[in-house]
Image (spheres, coloured by chain):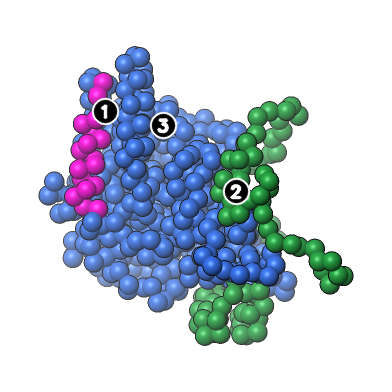
Chain colours: A blue, B green
Amino acid sequence: MTNIIASVEGVHKSGQPEALVAESLATIERHEPTLACLLDNNRDFIDQQVEELKGRLSAGENPALAGLPIILKDNICVRGLPTTCASQMLSNFVPPYDATVWERLRQAGAIMLGKANMDEFAMGSSTENSAFAVTRNPWDPERVPGGSSGGSAAAVAAGYVLTSLGSDTGGSIRQPAAFCGVTGLKPTYGRVSRYGLVAFASSLDQIGPITTSATDAALVLSVIGGHDAKDSTSSEDPLPAELADLESAPSLRNVRLALPDVVPKLLSDQARAAFEASLAELREMGVTIEEVSLPYLEEALSAYYVIAPAEASSNLARYDGVRYGARPEGIDFENISDLTTKTRSALFGAEVKRRIMLGTYTLSAGYYEAYYNRAQKVRTALRNVYDEVLSKGFLAVVTPTTPGPAFKVGEKTSDPVSMYLSDVFTVSANLTGLPALSIPSGFSPEGLPLGLQLQGRAFSELELLTLARDYQRTTEHHLRRPRAAAAR
Amino acid sequence: MSESHLTLEQARHVAGLSKLHFEEEELRDLRAEMEAILQTVSKLSQVPVEGLEATLAVGAYANRFREDEVGLSMPVEEALANAPAQRDGCFEIVRILSKSSEA
């Protein structure tokens, strides 16, 4: 398996998806005991999908992703399979409907092999907040894969599949993609339907692909993206046809990228050197990089850590212990309020509680103006800043995806503020709704992958991915595999 | 904004609003963590926001309406399938109205 098109062509020719699926399952079996990327790997469901696809192939259909093994983050609903959000609260939840992204992937012939581990309810930057497992980074199992889509990114890096889906509320696709040396795209808000995605912060959440190349990310986006009547925030802006075949898209000429002048001071010496090396690679391709003043990058992180918990506290109010979700064993309750409080206290993890508390506080009378409303105005200021920079002919704003490489398991769990700081470059794209892409851009001295982020105008995914494709044609960072995966 | 001091009493009040119960020691730790986070986000006050509207959502959206026609909806059994307790086609909860006037 090297790229999606080649894999799918093989299935189209043979009419047999079994070999591709078996190869993925063998890789999973080999590495899963070490990496723990998956929460569920339902063989009956896989067999059923393979049979269904074989029927379609023999009837002459040639769907775009025929037989392609995929993995979905466990906050994306698949009818009839557990969707837990890595929370005890949803440990027995079986959705009665399919998420739109999964419906489209299934229609395109993809085979879902399993649900990926994540931070509980997507709250976290390391996947250590999962109630069920600690996922390990395939480049160094002592380190985290990033988060919250850590299982999705580690699964692609370890060669389980060529693509997985994650969700990104403040960097949850791009940061783990950077930590795991793979490509991750957070599309423009509204580009991909959120129907069937368990809500964290609804004005920020977006589903996107994690892949080994920009070309594959474009192809997956072409399948999952586009308008969906079931999501009122989904955009009617048409998807460019070129996404389905990015290799044939013409290269971009005279590309200019904006480099925020505050970036270097937010990086360690090592990270700065690596970042400058990747900027040099871009310049060699003929890209012009200009320093710009882009204020509020650090303040954006503050706005994010007000807005996201506020929306979360409201969204997670639905877990009342009555309509769905688990019930703690053997609890006694006097009244409905007691039932709700006991259920939530027993079944939510520490980080989820922390964010519900923060959000409830900043939304409460007397603090709303100072925190929530202020943060929403800073969000407007940030949007204005990005609009202004991107209207000056820049294709994108370029930054590292993260201030440094993957940290060690347990290193930041006791210090939420330091954990939050690893999101400083990623949250702006969620607050502004703009698309952002993380691509492998080199390695730290200890051999850990680093990512470069490109954040562009609304609905400019094709341009960002085309530039990334050209970068991946001239560099080999994205081709390097962790030892775990190379051993297969 | 400058006042980001969070008292234990306030933290207890917020826990009640959040429908979360904490043991006293847990609440003390959480209060300290929340205060550290609130101090970090106090950077917000450094951004000039006079005259700016709050961004509630990005993108241009309009309500979409459908025809007012009867269609299929989720069968009751499926809607109830994930409930921790159900009876007679309904979610089962404890009594919310008392016989006396205390409710």
Q: Residues within 10 Å of mark 1 (few under 14, many from 20)?
A: many
Write down the region rendered in magenta.
Answer: A15-32
The quadrant in which residue A463 appears is top left
Is residue B41 visible in the rendered structure shown here? yes
The Cα–Cα distance between marks 2 and 3, rounded to whole angstroms, is 29 Å
Identify the residue at horizontal 59%, vertical 75% (top origin): B21
For residue B76, which numbered disc appears in the image? none
Residue type at the position of mark 3:
Arg
Which of the pair A192/A443 is nearer the observer? Answer: A192
Which chain letter goes with mark 2? B
x and y percent of residue A49 in the render?
Answer: 36, 31
Q: Which residue is mark 3?
A: A106
- Which residue position holds label 1? A17
Instruction: Chain letter for mark 3, please.
Output: A
Q: Looking at the image, which residue is at 86% across and 70% down?
A: B100
Subunit ID for the residue under disc 1 = A
Q: Which residue is mark 2?
A: B58
